[in-house]
Structure formats: C-alpha cells, structure tokens
Amino acid sequence: MTKKIPTNTITRNLCDIAAPTGNIYESVVILSKRANQIAIAEKKELTKKLEDFKNDRDTMEEVFENREQIEISKFYEKQPKPALVAISEFENGEIYYRMAKKEEEE
C-alpha cells in the first residue's frame, strides 16, 4: 500500500463519519461493505502467492522450513486491517457509493 494508513485503531468523531451520508448507520454500512471487498481481495492475493508453495506431499519438516512462505504470511499480517483502510478511503472521499432509490408510497 502506498498510502500511510495507521495499523492501530484511533478515536474518530462520529459526526465526521456521518457527514458524507447524513446518517451514521449508512456510513457504517458503506464502510463494512468496502472492508469486506478489501479483505476478499487480500485473501485472493495471498492465496495466489501461497499456491506456488503448495505440494501434495508436504511433511511437517517441509512446512516449518519454508521461509519464503513464512515471510509472505508475515508481510500480510503487518498490513493495516481492511476496516482501517476502508475508513481512510472514506475520510479521503475515495469510495464511490450510491443509495438505492426509495420507492414512493402511494
């Protein structure tokens, strides 16, 4: 990631999060959906990288000795959590979202 995103939680003002949508609950739904998208993308990327190390005849010794695989896993563990990335994108106006049209009552 090229952006500086904190890897730990910080206190945020709820009014700032609610401001773009006018409703804190709508903002939280947007954040959770974006965090899920990020988590799925990271999982796919990690799985793809770890597929290179997959072997049908892995023994316990081979699993513990594979340093490259361990380094890749450590790299992903150090990445900011998807929720923190989503909040950062939301605060910077980098998330596109739209509200479903409400049907008019007759």
Image: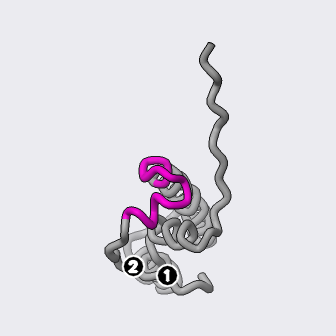
**Whether residue 25 can be seen here:** yes
Rate crowding at label 2 as few (under 14), some (14 to 19) or many (20 or more) other CA atoms within 10 Å. few
Judged by depth in the image, the label closer to the viewer, 2 or 1, is: 1
Q: Which residue is drawn at 62% across and 13% down?
A: 106
Q: Which residue is drawn at 32% across and 74% down?
A: 11
Rate crowding at label 1 as few (under 14), some (14 to 19) or many (20 or more) other CA atoms within 10 Å. some
Q: Determine whether, in the image, residue 18 is placed left or right of residue 21.
A: left
Q: Label 2 to label 1, Cα distance in Å?
A: 32 Å
Query: Considering depth in this image, is 103 or 57 the residue closer to the camera?
Result: 103
**Tag 2–tag 1 contact (CB < 8 Å):** no
How far across and down, in percent of the image, does residue 57 sit?
51, 64
**Whether residue 66 can be seen here:** no
**Secondary element at image label 1:** loop
Q: Main secondary structure of the magenta part?
A: helix
Q: Does the magenta stretch include residue 1?
A: no
Q: Does the magenta stretch include residue 17?
A: yes
> Which residues, given as a range, are shown in magenta?
14-27
**Secondary element at image label 2:** helix
Query: Considering depth in this image, is 56 or 97 the residue closer to the camera?
Result: 97
Residue under label 1: 5
Q: What residue type is labelled 2?
A: Phe
How far across and down, in percent of the image, does residue 5 sit?
49, 81
Query: Considering depth in this image, is 85 or 61 the residue closer to the camera?
Result: 85
How far across and down, in percent of the image, does residue 56 sit?
55, 61
Q: Residue at x 39, y 79 (%)?
A: 64
How far across and down, in percent of the image, does residue 50 sit?
57, 70
Q: Earlier in the sequence, mark 2 or mark 1?
A: 1
Marking on residue 64: 2
Q: Which amino acid does label 1 sit on?
A: Ile
Marking on residue 50: none
Q: Residue at x 45, y 53 (%)?
A: 28
Residue 12, image quadrant: bottom left
